[in-house]
Amino acid sequence: MDFKNKVVIITGASSGIGKACAEEFAKRGTDLVLAARQYVTLCEISADLEKRYGIRAVAVQTDVSKEEDCELLVKQSIVTYGKIDILVNNAGLSMRALFNEVDLSVLKHLMDVNFWGTVYCTKYALPEILKTRGSVIGVSSIAGYRGLPGRTGYSASKFAMNGFMESLRTELLKSGVHVMVACPGFTTSNIRVAALAKDGAVHGETSMEEGKMMTPEEVAITIVDGIAARKRTLVMTGQGKLTVWINKLLPALADKLVFSHFTKEKNALIK
């Protein structure tokens, strides 16, 4: 696939996987619409990518949990470029708290960002993507295949995203639109630092050993290559693939293995 002069919207583009995807698309000549709440940061990223790669980039301040923001994001994309080829639903939020202790507002917030953000952006972008026979991407997680302790709201939101994307793919089977779910394993990004605690406060530190994880840049290359090949699903890392298969074939064993893995976290929630 030739990405030159294609137009891609990336949500959650101010850091982590979203920012890395913006760079990878820019390297391949794609024009960008970068969306996130951090507008100043987005503007700096956009200007830097335009200067280094000679592409066009526009920053749009967006809170994907707000439907009106998502609608305006798509309208701005059309006003700027006249079309949309690819939508990367990447904006996401995590949590770290036991369900018995968590404030339910935390779960609602995660659903609003991770699930409804994907739904809102896809709803408004899809008519344009149907015209270009482009791609709709959901950046999900292994947590969307296997529930993780201390991440009830996160897993629920990613399971919901996976179901939504699968249904959408089937609806669009004869349309020429490509629908892909990308599921990174644990990735070195700020998602654990920004994860919500039981009261909704930001944790401010990671609970895992970041050095052994995929980098955002590695994830971005895999995602963009997957779009080029019009892949259906990307389950990244051997650990991720193994988790998905064990959970399907031996779910009781998966319970024990996942429990054991999360007892080794820093300040583990389960013991």
Image: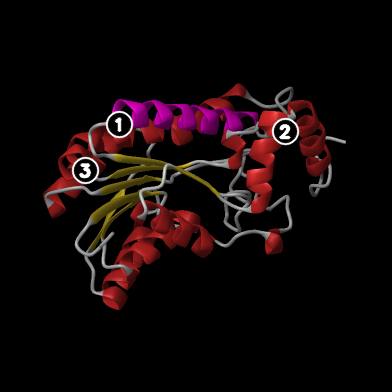
Measured in 3D between alpha carbons, the distance from the residue under mark 1 to the one under mark 3, in whole angstroms, is 11 Å
Q: Specify few, some or many for label 2: CA neighbours under 10 Å numbering under 14, 14-19, or 20 or more.
A: many
Left or right: residue 198 compared with residue 19? right
Q: Amino acid at mark 2?
A: Pro
Picture residue at 68% right of the left edge, 27% below the top: 102
Question: Residue 86 at x, y = what percent?
Answer: 28, 48
How has the structure been colored for display?
secondary structure
Point out the stretch of residues depicted in magenta: 152-172
Please tell me which of labels 2 and 1 falls first in the chain. 2
Q: Which residue is mark 3?
A: 133
Left or right: residue 124 compared with residue 64? left
Question: Residue 162 at x, y = what percent?
Answer: 48, 32
Q: In this orientation, which residue lies closer to the viewer: 21 or 271?
A: 21
Q: How many marks?
A: 3
Question: Residue 243 at x, y = what percent?
Answer: 68, 40
Q: Amino acid at mark 3?
A: Arg
* Quarter occupied by the C terminus: top right
Please tell me which of labels 1 and 3 falls first in the chain. 3
